[in-house]
Amino acid sequence: MSARRFGRVFIRRAATLLTAAACLAAVTIAASADEVRLPNGIVLNGTVLPIGGPNERTSRQADRDNPSEAFLLVDDGVRRYIVPNRRVEFERRDELSGVPQFEFQRSRRSRSRTPDLIGSATFEPFSEFGKRTVTLTTSRGPVAIVQEITRLRPDYAIVEGVTHEWTQGFDTRLIPADRLQQLLRLSSNPKLLDDRKAIVRFYIDAEMYSEASRELQQVIADFPDEAAWGQSQVEILAEQNARRGMREVLRRQAAGQHALALEIARKAPPDSVSADVFNQAQEIVDGYTRAAERAERALLLLEQYESELESPLASQVRPLRLAVRDELFVENVDRLDPFLRAEVDAQLTPSEKLALAYSAWIVGPTYADLNLTVALNLWQARFLVSEHLRTDRDAIRRGRLATQIRELEGVTIERMAELLERLPSTWDGFRPEPGVPHEYAIESNQREQAAYAVTLPLEYHPQHRYPLIVALHRSGQSLEETLRWWAGDEEAPGYAMRRGCIVIAPEFAEPGAAEYDYSIQAHQRVLAAISDARKKFSVDSDRIYIAGHEIGGDACFDIAIAHPDLFAGAAPFLARPDRFVLRTWQNAIALPWYIVAGERDRDTLDKNATLVNNLGKRGANLIYCEYKARGFESYHEELPALFDWMELHRRRPLSDVKDGWEAAVMRPSENSFYWLTIDQMPERVFKPINWEQPRSVPQAMSVNAKVTLGNTLHLRHPGSRATVWLSPEFMSFETRFLANVNGRERLREIVQPSIEVMLEDFRQRGDRERLYWAKLEF
């Protein structure tokens, strides 16, 4: 049987099972799901089916061109994940120990047909009997559909239409805990021990440990003969709850939420968890204690050694000590390691010890210096750099400042790179409190007024580096509403706030826009917002993720494909890619994708299928997530999995692309990739395109570059001028550099790094993680 036909049969059989004849309420055990581990580390659980393509057309094409099954479909009951069938680890699980599931008596059914396409809808809460009314917005007016839960598992619930034919699933965690308890009681017999045990296991599998503990205690009270079993479950429950707590501690630590991490770690009960868990918690508490003690000791020593200096020198280092005191943080105490180790070195003078401390604070322990004059110069360089970055409109003054920095003794290009990486934000404007949205007015590249709003995460600290989510709104949604969807707010922190992510929502579209226009202005507004956020806040530029809903999803596709070197991943929701995206998609083969859609949302799958098929068959890191029998929704329930995915991805380093990259360009905004900027694009990219006449649409132009052995650059581009930005990450400043541009040798010499170039590029982009040391113009 072909992959295409097999896929249709599989889905049809699954639907038949879900709409089987009515049954009485019962507790059963479902088989465990298969497991698929992707190359990026993500694990998907569900029923696995090899397929030739994302939809019927691409599967039919695969059957004709290549009999191999290029994709895997993983059905977890609620959604279908489609992933490339490359380098995956697949484990089929046939054991019947499975998971508990509760089935409900079904009502009499009506045979009314649900609309094939489901637009926006409103959902009433479930009643204590597991029923709710969903009101769909259709072209003929609102349609009310009564649904009821027919199957309940720890991971998902199945709901079926009472008034209409409509079966769908959703994650169990979306049901409020009190309503879930009522439903479990409704579908079980409280006098049957096996049913009561199944409820306990249900809660444990759902990681609802408080509810599991309450139910377990009640079972022990109602069935005294099961006290031994109950005690064993109490121990298992305590251990699993503690391990989840430890995972949360580690996640909060990674998010820079150290106060909360310490609070959770301190609560690990020594008497009811394993020694491993308790020792891990205690080690975390001890680590915070040691960091606080080292910070206190360092400040004491700085003051002591300062008192031993001559008066003029002591007055010079006193402001440095106060600055270190203000900037000292649990994550940067290790900058003072050389200084703390030097305490017992009797051969070092107080001046040399202070030099170690103050130089390491600016450029890190590797480039620390024993010369106090050099240390003072590094602090002077930091001050001058800050002035340089604040000087937006006076190029002459910036040039003088850069010259002053370059002439300071001990300020090398290597140390300047380290200084910029650790430089606190030079922006001294208003910074909002975590969870409180705030909007900033900015200028795009064309001096056009633009805006974006931002929400900062819990315990925001300028010394911690944060991932950045660029959230593009759907039509009719405000920037604040977009931020609230991703981050929550001060009263109810959402996923981004808890996971330690900064979220910005750029105003990329024209007011009231119902469709994305694929304009250059949209790109400029988003890129300007990213640059501005990097300058104002502590952003990790290797962890910038772009996402969006509906027209924001379309923009997400377009901007990510046009600028793949900016992002660590892209997550379009409810998107329908078109125009430039379908002609330049190969730009983003190396960019990780997480695409979310609903099966009954317009023609979303067919619009995505060609792109997903092309990317997947060429080795892209890609997940296509389709919610079964669901339409135009926000799919907020996908956020936990999406944030897990983001944690696994970083921006592709320049060292990974030195062996060669290629891009397709069709617009003036597509003029910068990795280390190349095309300064003068061909005239044809400025001409408007009539997309109503596909044959008149011009072909994309190609750009490609690589750095080969022998420190040689090979570059081809369609412009008349270009700038190549150089970094030791992919070339050497120690040997002669050869540049071959458009088939002509343009350079054969040793390139000298430039502090001026590094500073000016950093001022414009604010990218601490990708600094360029020199540039060549051809």
Image (cartoon, rainbow, N blue to C red):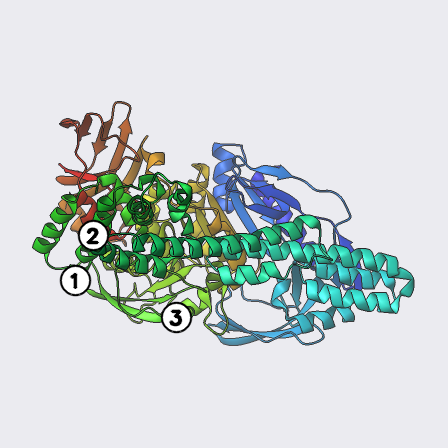
Q: Amino acid at mark 1?
A: Arg
- The mark tally for this picture is 3
- At 87% from the left edge and 65% from the top edge, which residue is drawn? 192
- At 33% from the left edge and 49% from the top edge, which residue is drawn? 361
Regarding mark 1 in the picture, which secondary structure is present there? loop
Dot 1 corresponds to which residue?
447
- Tell me how far mark 1 sits from mark 2, CA to CA: 33 Å
Q: Position of residue 39 (x, y in %)?
A: 52, 39
> Going by the image, does 429 lie left or right of 457?
left
Q: Can you name the residue that lies furthest to the top here?
A: 710
Disc sitting over residue 433 in the figure:
3
Above/below status of 342 relative to 221: above
Regarding mark 3 in the picture, which secondary structure is present there? loop
The residue nearer to you, when weighing 58 against 771, is 771
Q: Is residue 72 visible?
A: yes
- At 28% from the left edge and 35% from the top edge, which residue is drawn? 728
Q: Amino acid at mark 2?
A: Gln
The image quadrant of residue 156 is bottom right
The residue nearer to you, when weighing 353 against 560, is 353
